[in-house]
Image (cartoon, rainbow, N blue to C red):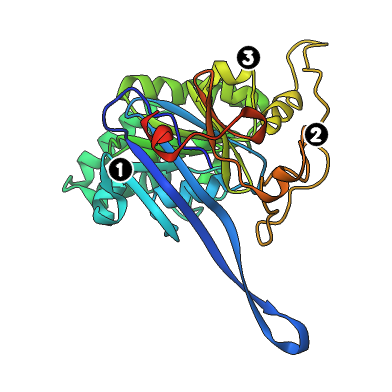
Amino acid sequence: MVNDIKPASATPAIALERLKVHFPLRGSGLFGRHRKSVVKAVDGVDLTVGSNEMFGLAGESGCGKSTIARVLIGLTAPSEGRVLFQGKPLGSIADSELRTRIQMVFQDPYGSLNPRRTVADIVSDPLVVHTRLNRTQRLEKVDELLEQVGLSAHHAHRFPHEFSGGQRQRIAIARALIIDPGFLVLDEPTSALDVSVQAVILNLIRRFKQERHLGCLFITHDLNLMRFMTTRLAVMYLGRIVETGKTEDIFRSPLHPYTRALIASTPQPKPGGRAKTPPIQGELPSPVNPPSGCPFHTRCPDKIGRVCEIEVPRATMVDGRLVACHLHGTPQSESQADAA
């Protein structure tokens, strides 16, 4: 478990403290007896995101990234630990207030928009729930925001099936921004789009982030996008954070074997640019029955012995980053990690 390096701001927008999310799983064991198990989707995560920061969360599919996103917007309850928003426990903030302060752009623009409703209805819904604006005022704000995301007012009365994937994601962004939230959760916002459209959507997100001084959690498995979009980055594996630091520092000299392998497996823009690191071997272990010790030891090319199999690595400060790996010396104490 890595205790996150905190951003420069005194009170971060988001702080996760020892966050765990375990989903109960019920199945049949021997002789028809019921066996209770849990899926350890998130297993002790510490993260902080600044109020005007684009923070990245990277890792393979199934590592727990989207579960963290769902916790932040109140769709999934933590099993243990705390989630703070601007210093307040998330559970102490009323749902109606939380919706106006944190919004999410989902991965699939085809599934996140109601096909039976017009764009005007979809984008204006938050205004209906959270403001006292009349219909004329709401439609004026919708038209204005549609123009800002690259659509136009005449699109407001069409249905989602009349738009391309990139246009639908623009609509989803407009819906998220219509009530001026202070924080955006971006869960793989371009993975369902053509490559030619991705850059347009990413630049749109960056522009709104700068203009509105948004804090953002940008979730993706595409490290090329992560390098383009974020200033700080956390790498997640099997429900745990294995490395945290400035994005450029991590790309320049990754410390954790998993981080190195992820970067090496990312397509490079020029021939011969790929790092000389062998690809990750084996399959991602089951979060129902994760390995003992270091969660990565079953696939790690740099495993150093039984210590990796029996002892969970704790955070070590190396070159301004925190890394959870037995290769990097004696783990620091909890107090040292928190002070970082």
Asked whether 126 or 118 is in front, the reply is 126
Q: Position of residue 48 (x, y in %)?
A: 40, 35
Q: Is residue 264 visible from the viewing direction of this image?
A: yes
Q: Residue flagged by tag 3: what amino acid is it?
A: Arg
Q: Position of residue 133 (x, y in %)?
A: 18, 45
Q: Tag 3's secondary structure? A: helix
Q: Tag 1's secondary structure? A: strand
User: Which is nearer the N-term, disc 3 or disc 1?
Assistant: 1
User: Which is nearer the N-term, disc 2 or disc 3?
Assistant: 3
Q: Residue flagged by tag 2: what amino acid is it?
A: Pro
Q: Residue flagged by tag 1: what amino acid is it?
A: Phe
Q: Position of residue 318 (x, y in %)?
A: 55, 22
Asked whether 104 or 132 is in front, the reply is 104
State how far apart marks 2 and 3 are (Cα): 20 Å
Q: Which mark is residue 252?
A: 3
Task: Please name the residue shown 68% across and 50% down the image.
Answer: 310
The residue under label 1 is: 85
Please tell me whether mark 2 or mark 1 is closer to you in this view.
2
Please tell me whether mark 3 or mark 1 is closer to you in this view.
3
Q: Which mark is residue 301?
A: 2
State how far apart marks 2 and 1 are (Cα): 38 Å
